[in-house]
Image: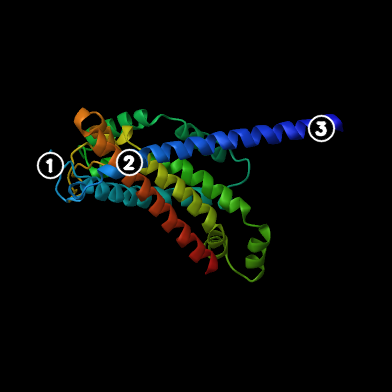
Amino acid sequence: MKDKKLLDIFLLVITWVFAAVTFTALIYVIAHILVNGIPHLTPSLFEFRHTMANVSMMPSIISTLYMVGLALGIAVPLGVFTAVYLIEYMKKGSRLVKIIRSATQMLSGIPSVVYGLFGMLLFVQFFGFGWSLIAGALTVSIMILPIIIVTTEEALKSVTGGFREGGYALGAGKLTVVFKIVLPSAIPGILAGVILAVGRIIGESAALIFTAGTVAQIPTELTASARTLTVHMWVLSGEAHHTNEAYATGVILLLVVLLINTFSAVIARFLVKR
């Protein structure tokens, strides 16, 4: 009994230590970016036309929002419907389910550079999209599919069987139960996966360099090249005389992530109340 108490205390201390280290590292990174970036936020960085003189990040901000919207528009329906099919329609223990889940796990472990090379060969060259917004969005949507599928599966599993049984008892069909009862109940968990996917999209650079390109302009069509904020930071950090602007871009990147996460949380709360 005494040994068990000592083990519990030891594990508790280890947990608190690692939590403190993680929190300290997070605060240090954020503080470092803010201290070095905020003083260099100037109006010229928010001009809608990028030049070598102002190195404006506004085209990259707009390109990032376009990229997030396109990638989610492709990946979320595909990922959600895949998870619904696996949980609600397939037999448990089916060989096809095992194959799909194994493929999902493999996709989640592939490095982003490999995704970039794949996207460049398939979308940029084979389909002829060139370095473009659509090529980058298609590549990133494949990257975030595992996140959407896994989180949606877990959200669907968390819905109690009583909800389904109650729907069937009232005479509802399979499709009605799934889309009118189960999916609405699983929305908070699905949105959690969407938030994680948004973070992955915004933080991606390697795959987008190979597919979306690095042209600093506001894309006017899907086949136009686009430079997201992380790619913009990468380009600026490679130029010694634009390091300060790279830090300033980092501040805006943190702000964009915070705003998108906050907006997603508000939507989740609204849908739960509905």
Q: Where in the figure is residue 11, as x and y percent of width and height?
A: 70, 33
> From this viewpoint, which residue is outermost toward the bottom?
170
In the foreground, 171 or 274: 274
First reached walking from the N terminus: tag 1 or tag 3: 3
Disc 2 marks which residue? 250
Which secondary structure, mark 3? Answer: helix
Q: Tell me the CA gap for discs 2 and 3.
A: 47 Å
Lateral position of residue 156 relative to residue 128, left or right: right
Q: Earlier in the sequence, mark 1 or mark 2?
A: 1
Residue occupying the point 43% across, 52% down: 261
Q: Amino acid at mark 2?
A: Gly
Question: Which residue carries the number 3 mark?
Answer: 4
Residue 196 visible within the image: yes
Disc 1 target residue = 51
Q: Residues within 10 Å of mark 2 (few under 14, many from 20)?
A: many
Give the quadrant of the N terminus.
top right
Q: Is residue 143 above or below residue 166?
A: above
Residue sitting at 17 percent across and 48 percent down?
Answer: 44
Q: Residue at x 26, y 31 (%)?
A: 237
Location of residue 91 in the rendering, given as x and y in whole percent from the top left corner: 61, 46
Of the two numbered discs 2 and 3 on the same chain, state the one appearing first in sequence: 3
Amino acid at circle 1: Thr
- Residue at disc 2, secondary structure: helix
Spatial separation of the CA atoms under disc 1 and disc 3: 65 Å
Q: How packed is label 1: few (under 14 Cα within 10 Å), some, or many (20 or more)?
A: few
What color scheme is it?
Answer: rainbow
Label 1, label 2: how many angstroms apart (C-alpha)?
Answer: 19 Å
Residue type beneath disc 3? Lys
Name the image quarter holding residue 12: top right
Which one is in front, 44 or 159? 44
Side (left or right) of 253 relative to 272: left
